[in-house]
Image (spheres, rainbow, N blue to C red):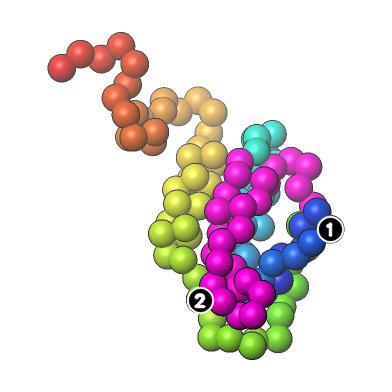
């Protein structure tokens, strides 16, 4: 379990989620881009919740190990989405973009 400190506040989330947020923020910074992400958190009273973070080149994140008060959790759909986004961001700039990256057809193609 880890605590993400961000913009004067903090949230508690799973280890893998916190690590993915940090790696994604780094990938975005390398491309001078930003994104809003929705992550699973432990809200007040230990209930599960969600938090939205704006991450990008100006993000100043600090992630610290938290004393476990609950069982560890991570959102596998979130983690896969972040991995896919990082893969797309870190491709070399010269590679063509696959229409599947954005869930649509390539512009100018006909059936």
Callout 1: SS: loop
x and y percentages locating residue 97 in the rendered image: 41, 28
Left or right position of 95 against 19:
left
Left or right position of 67 against 100:
right
Instruction: Give the residue at x 32% y 29%.
Output: 104
Q: Is residue 16 visible?
A: no
- Front residue of 55/100: it is 55
Instruction: Give the residue at x 34% y 16%.
Output: 107
Q: Quadrant of residue 40?
A: bottom right
Instruction: Give the residue at x 78% y 42%.
Output: 58
Callout 2: SS: loop
Stretch of the chain drawn in magenta: 35-60
Q: Are marks 1 and 2 in contact (CB under 8 Å)?
A: no
What is the residue that sits farthest to the front in this orientation? 45
90, above or below 73, in the image? above
10 Å crowding of disc 1: few (<14), some (14-19), many (20+):
few
Q: Quadrant of residue 49?
A: bottom right
How many numbered marks appear? 2
- Front residue of 16/5: it is 5
What label does residue 59 carry, if any? none
x and y percentages locating residue 88 in the rendered image: 48, 40
Instruction: Give the residue at x 50% y 25%.
Output: 94
What label does residue 8 carry, if any? 1
Q: Which residue is identified by label 2?
A: 73
Q: Quadrant of residue 103?
A: top left
**Mark nearer the viewer, 1 or 2:** 1
Main SS type for the magenta part?
strand
């Amino acid at each position: 379990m880890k605590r993400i400190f961000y913009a004067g506040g903090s949230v508690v989330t799973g280890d893998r989620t916190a690590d993915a947020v940090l790696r994604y923020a780094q990938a975005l910074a390398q491309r001078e881009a930003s994104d809003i992400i929705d992550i699973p958190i432990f809200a007040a009273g230990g209930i599960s919740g969600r938090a939205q973070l704006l991450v990008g080149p100006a993000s100043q994140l600090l992630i610290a190990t938290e004393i476990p008060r609950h069982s560890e959790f991570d959102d596998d759909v979130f983690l896969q989405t972040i991995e896919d986004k990082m893969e797309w961001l870190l491709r070399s700039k010269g590679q063509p973009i696959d229409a599947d990256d954005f869930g649509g057809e390539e512009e100018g193609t006909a059936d």
